[in-house]
Amino acid sequence: KHHDLTGSKRESHLHLGLYGAGAEEFQLLQPQGAVSVSAGETLTLICSVSGVVPAGPVKWFKGSGSGRQLVYAQVGSFPRVTRAVSGSDTDFTIHINDTRPEDAGIYRCVKFRKGSGADEEFRSGAGTVVSVSGDTRRGGLVGGGRCLVSASLILPHKKMQVLLAVAG
């Protein structure tokens, strides 16, 4: 008897999940709370929509309020930005190439609804806080290379080999 109860409970749950009103509801999902990237790397910002999607574009913005800056829209030219899934109606994940320290900030994925005049903001993502560490990693690699050379220079009998290696 106990098993039957659980079974029927599960069934009704599934039924609700598939056919309940909630299944049709529009949802915008921006799951990343914070992302850290090194300068020069590619930054990926995730955003997807589901349910009944009203007509109108999805755009990415950096910052908030009137001072926010458009990062990506389906129409226009955004040289450093590419869509992860080109032409998708549900996946609006983007890649920002060659990130720079000034790319740090809060990014929001925003769904607009076609209005009588201009498109009106319909739903906004929770926001992703992006931090960009400066060229420290790249500088570290170069520094590391130099350290190897200077360490070899300390050994007098290897001086010739090192000079040849550096010259070559």
Image (cartoon, rainbow, N blue to C red):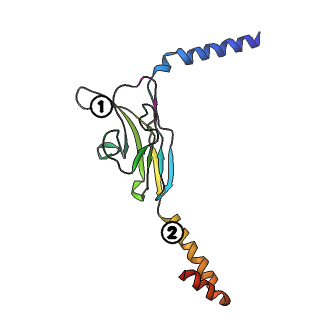
Amino acid type indicated by mark 2: Gly
Amino acid type indicated by mark 1: Glu
Left or right: 58 as drawn, with respect to 22? left
Q: Which residue is mark 1?
A: 120
Q: Secondary structure at mark 2?
A: helix
* Percent of width and height locating residue 15: 58, 14
Characterize the magenta stretch by its predominant secondary structure. Answer: loop
Specify whether residue 116 is painted magenta.
no
* Percent of width and height locating residue 149: 59, 80
Which residue appears at 51% of the width and 65% of the height?
Answer: 138
Could you say which is closer to the camera, residue 64 or residue 14? Answer: 14
Which residue appears at 47% of the width and 52% of the height?
Answer: 42
* Percent of width and height locating residue 168: 55, 80
Left or right: 52 as drawn, with respect to 140? left
Q: Which residue is mark 2?
A: 139
Q: Residue furthest top?
A: 1
Left or right: 58 as drawn, with respect to 134? left
